[in-house]
Image: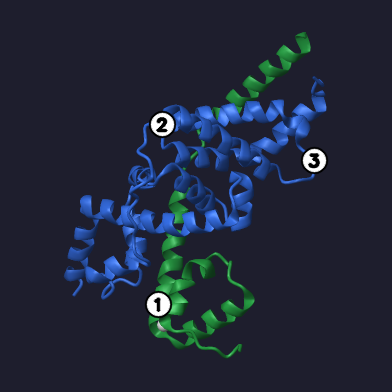
């Protein structure tokens, strides 16, 4: 059973789950076996991973406004003050 | 209502500070604008502070706080409702950037042209691409790309079934790739890469 060989289609269908580490262990073994043997899929898998990493890097490039932490602290102080007065 | 002890306000601040930057980035991607992101994070911080009594110390504060940010984003979204409904959402094919960069002949000269395309896109263009996604997809994608977390964790934060996370994520990132590609074409990024690859020939 474990020696089932995936077609390119079978492998590509599982690309997203593979990259997200959401495949079952059996599927994982089969996908990895296919990718090892198939240059075209290996290239696609690598490409997709790098692309997602690139998007990830872009998503993370949002900078927190410097004063927001102070604003929140003030907000919370005000909130605590309100409570103390009751 | 029980009053917060001074100690717990300090605890709260200590827990909040390290997750603030990610929370803001998430709010930014969900709302698509700086001012709203700031408001969202502040509102979430206030709600979290008020509800801090229900947080169990030692459990995942980040996930707990993210849930609150997501809830705030949801209610803001419901208030606005300016977006079209998701009925006629078109699909994008698998490996969208791979296929299209290949079609343009960019694989001959560049190892990964998609990375180059992304490198040349501004934060604003990335924001536009994310905004083109329907709200529910944006939520899942924002969490996915900002945090390396499992489908299950995303499901717990947004409070939807794990299968829904999976399908929205798979579809969402294809749509995102398509939208990034369209923007790269519109902004002549693809054209200049093509010229550069020709010049290198
Ligand atoms: Zn193959």
Q: Nearer the viewer, residue B86 or B28?
A: B86
Select label 2 or label 1 by which is in front: 2
User: Can the viewer see residue B120 in this picture?
Assistant: no
Whether residue B118 is situated above or below residue B7 in the rendered picture = below
Specify whether B136 is left or right of B127.
right
Residue depicted at x 66% and y 45%: B63
- Label 2 and label 1: CA atoms lie apart by 42 Å
Residue B80, percent across and down? 42, 28
Outermost residue, front side: B87
Chain (green):
A
Instruction: Give the number of the disc on residue A43.
Output: 1
Per the image, the residue denoted by label 2 is B81
Task: Classify the position of ligand 1 by quadrant: top left, top right, bottom left or bottom right.
Answer: bottom left
Please state which of residues B10 and B178 is positioned toward the viewer in this rendering.
Answer: B178
Check chain identity for marks 2 and 3: say if they share one: yes
Spatial CA distance of label 1 from label 3 is 45 Å
Q: Is residue B23 visible?
A: yes
């Amino acid at each position: 059973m474990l020696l089932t060989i995936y077609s390119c289609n079978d492998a590509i269908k599982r690309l997203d789950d593979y990259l997200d580490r959401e495949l079952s262990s059996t599927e994982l073994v089969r996908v990895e076996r296919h990718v090892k043997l198939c240059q075209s899929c290996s290239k696609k898998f690598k490409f997709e991973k790098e692309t997602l990493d690139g998007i990830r890097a872009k998503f993370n490039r949002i900078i927190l406004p410097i004063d927001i932490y102070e604003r929140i602290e003030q907000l919370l102080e005000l909130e605590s003050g309100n409570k103390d007065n009751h | 209502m029980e009053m917060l002890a001074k100690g717990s306000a300090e605890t709260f601040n200590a827990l909040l500070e390290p997750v603030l930057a990610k929370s803001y980035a998430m709010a930014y991607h969900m709302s698509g604008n700086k001012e709203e992101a700031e408001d969202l994070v502040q509102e979430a911080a206030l709600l979290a502070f008020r509800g801090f009594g229900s947080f169990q110390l030692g459990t995942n504060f980040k996930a707990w706080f993210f849930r609150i940010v997501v809830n705030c984003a949801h209610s803001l979204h419901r208030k606005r409702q300016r977006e079209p409904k998701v009925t006629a959402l078109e699909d994008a094919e698998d490996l969208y950037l791979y296929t299209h960069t290949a079609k343009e002949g960019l694989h001959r000269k560049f190892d990964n042209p998609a990375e180059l395309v992304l490198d040349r896109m501004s934060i604003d263009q990335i924001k536009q691409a994310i905004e083109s996604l329907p709200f529910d997809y944006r939520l899942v994608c924002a969490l996915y790309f900002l945090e390396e977390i499992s489908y299950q964790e995303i499901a717990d934060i947004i409070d939807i079934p794990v299968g829904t996370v999976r399908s929205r994520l798979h579809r969402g990132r294809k749509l995102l790739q398509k939208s990034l590609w369209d923007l790269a074409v519109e902004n002549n990024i693809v054209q200049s890469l093509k010229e550069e690859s020709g010049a290198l020939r």
